[in-house]
Amino acid sequence: IGRWGNFINREAFGRETEAFSRMGLTLPGRETVYVHPTFLYESLWNLVLLVILLLIRKRKKFEGEIFLLYLAGYGIGRAWIEGLRTDQLLIPGTSVAVSQVLAVVLAVVSVMMLIILRKKAVSRKQQ
């Protein structure tokens, strides 16, 4: 929901595009440019993630699994969406966004924890 504030304030949008989902943006001293509406992408990604989590919550193998799935899903979506944005803080001397690196680390660590904890849960169940 907080991302919709970015829409209202006309901030945190993506780079220019001709994609069907583009958003018109009039910048001072320029004609209208069409940009990726990253706030919309993130809102839709999170909504889809919520639906997925609600559908699989009854099949969880251990406490905290849904939370880890959320972290992994959010990290994956955020890494993709951050790649579209123009207002990124870059790691000095590179073209890599700090937020993308953090999102990838979040997703990777979450997936690793899911794998480890699922194996432990399955082995406990077999004993």
Image (cartoon, rainbow, N blue to C red):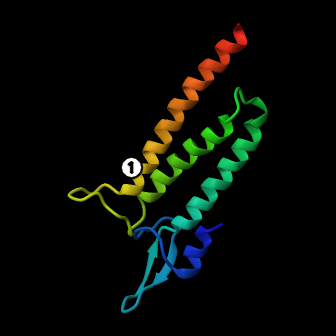
Position of residue 44 measured from the top left corner of the image (x, y, whole percent) = 63, 58
Q: Say which residue appears at 47% left-offset and 37% top-offset.
A: 108
Q: Quadrant of the N terminus?
A: bottom right
Q: Which residue is mark 1?
A: 101
91, above or below 116, in the image: below
Q: Quadrant of residue 119?
A: top right
Task: Using residue 56 as the reference point, say whether residue 92 is left or right of it.
Answer: left
Position of residue 89 measured from the top left corner of the image (x, y, whole percent) = 35, 64
Position of residue 49 measured from the top left corner of the image (x, y, whole percent) = 65, 48
Residue 107 visible somewhere in the drawing: yes
Q: Foreground: 64 or 51?
A: 64
Q: Kindly give the residue lying farthest to the bottom in the view shown.
A: 29
Q: Kindly give the residue lying farthest to the left in the view shown.
A: 93
Q: Say which residue appears at 41% left-offset and 56% top-offset.
A: 99
Q: Quadrant of the C terminus?
A: top right
Callout 1: 10 Å neighbours few (<14), some, many (20+)? some
Q: Kindly give the residue lying farthest to the top in the view shown.
A: 127
Residue type of the residue flagged with mark 1: Val
Picture mark count: 1
Label 1: which secondary element: helix
Residue 20 visible somewhere in the drawing: no
Task: Using residue 109 as the reference point, say whether residue 69 is left or right of it.
Answer: right
Task: Using residue 32 as the reference point, say whether residue 111 is left or right of it.
Answer: right
Q: Foreground: 33 or 105?
A: 105
Position of residue 118 measured from the top left corner of the image (x, y, whole percent) = 62, 23
Q: Say which residue appears at 51% left-offset and 65% top-offset.
A: 38
Q: Say which residue appears at 53% left-offset and 34% top-offset.
A: 111
Task: Using residue 102 as the reference point, say whether residue 110 is left or right of it.
Answer: right
Q: Foreground: 65 or 32?
A: 65
